[in-house]
Image (cartoon, coloured by chain):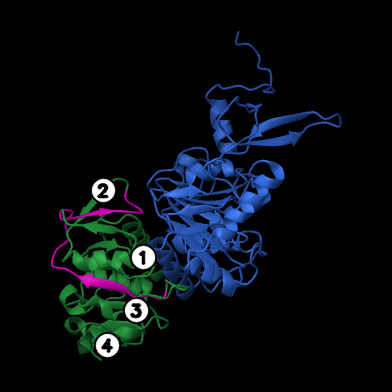
Chain colours: A blue, B green
Amino acid sequence: MSDYNFAYLDEQTKRMIRRAILKGIAIPGYQVPFASREMPMPYGWGTGGVQVSAACLTPDDSFKVIDQGADDTTNAVSIRKFFEHTAGVATTEHTVDATVIQTRHRIPEEPLTEDQILVYQVPIPEPLRFLEPRETETRKMHALEEYGLMHVKLYEDIARHGNIATAYAYPVKVEDRYVMDPSPIPKFDNPKLEMAAIQLFGAGREQRIYAIPPYTKVVSLDFEDHPFDPSKADHPCDLCGAEHTYLDEVIIDDEGGRMFVCSDTDYCSKRQADGHRGRLSPIEEAAE
Amino acid sequence: MDIQSLSGGFENAPVQSAHAFRTALNVLSRPGTIMELRGANAPAPVSEAAATLLLTLCDPETPLYLADTHDTKEVRDWIAFHIGAPLVGRAHAHFALGTWEALSPINTFPIGTPEYPDRSTTLIAELDELNEHGASLTGPGIKDRAHLGLPEIDAFQMNACLFPLGLDFYFTAGTRVAALPRSTKVEAD
């Protein structure tokens, strides 16, 4: 603990990141450039999210990290350990107990409250990047609010597949102004982007921070005759029976057997503790 | 430089600035919310909330404009010792500090460019008092409607029209702070 400054980064770096976060809040959906630092983990492992979390954490916080909804995967475990070590903050796996939640590619199923901050790890912050590789051009397109190209992409999806085939990182328009990449969350999570908590997005390699303040209008792009559909696998969870959660498909044998389970492990185990059961729940001994 | 300039900083900078930032983040994310902000003490007339904001957000990389009311030798010395921000004119300021009257007219501050709307000034306006009655606020961060006593209305309506360009405001009075980002729509109540 004494080997590091609180939360790893030096104070001047944190001030720089904090200023970028505040600009992001003031201009919802706009990608604020910041001087991303090298972190003791590779790019792609959440360096942007880690820097944003480091700038936000106080010693009083309770910190949760999820990777695709799970608290117990490598990425989540190592980032949680990193902040236990460098900030000495309390950590939790329970969504309701957390004040700062860093996430990779999911929004927790439990609705978040005004007292929480959700920090997203973002690989490619620019929603137009795969359509226009030049930063000078995409910047101009945002400045001119020229988003026709994005609608063309969605239209081509419909022309080719009959529906909008984009299933994750589904583009949204924030407060009727900026088109924004919500990070690679499944489109199932898009409706939750309008929430009571503060949402911060950090892209370390691409050196961008952006934000959505609470209760901000966030609209998934669509067409009148092809409205946005936050689809999910047509199954209940095989462990807790939930029919309203986002599911992971897990292959369980060599013969095509599979199960569907909640991707949000905390939510699933909480439901199981409350007595909900699914198709593949372990058979319990009947109480004598 | 006298002894007063050397005191009044954070005792535990990483922890106090982390708490202060969370307050700054919360009030900006929820326009109309008033919170307590303590920790730093600068020479008069700088309020405790404004001094804490400066210490949390400013450093040698952020040119600062001091309006006439706050441009005293004592304040300059305190900023030189604790923050090191270069003191500049309005046209180059990332942050500006003063009473609302002294900061006006606010259309002399940079509002950013269409490509980089973040290259604008954040104003820290010292008010006599802060209260949750007055102008009606709507926009991002506000569930239905919020209220905040603002020194005037027109200037903030003009500023909101510039969105996504424009200025962002912190209002301070004693140990209390509130904020108004450019995204907030202001109406007289």
Residue that badge 1 annotates: B163
Evaluate whether residue B178 shows in this view.
yes
Left or right? Give the position of A151 relative to A198: right
Decide which of tag 4 and tag 1 comes sooner along the chain.
4
Q: State the residue at coordinates (29%, 78%).
A: B96
> Disc 4 on helix, strand or loop?
helix
* Vertical relation: B30 (above or below) B75: above
Name the mark nearer the viewer: 3 or 4: 3
Residue A93 falls in image quadrant = top right
Decide which of tag 1 and tag 3 comes sooner along the chain.
3
Residue B133 image position (x, y, % from top left): 15, 53
Decide which of tag 1 and tag 2 comes sooner along the chain.
2
Residue that badge 2 annotates: B145
The boundaries of the magenta stretch are: B119-142
The chain letter under disc 1 is B
Q: State the residue at coordinates (22%, 82%).
A: B67
Density class for disc 3 (Cα within 10 Å; few <14, some 14-19, many ≥20) is many
Does the magenta-highlighted stretch encompass residue A84? Answer: no
> Disc 2 on helix, strand or loop?
loop
Residue B160 image position (x, y, % from top left): 30, 64
Task: Respond whether the residues carrying marks 4 and 1 are from the same subunit.
Answer: yes
Tell me the quadrant of the picture where the N terminus of chain B can be found. Answer: bottom left
Pick out the residue farthest to the left. Answer: B128
**Main SS, magenta residues:** loop
The chain letter under disc 4 is B
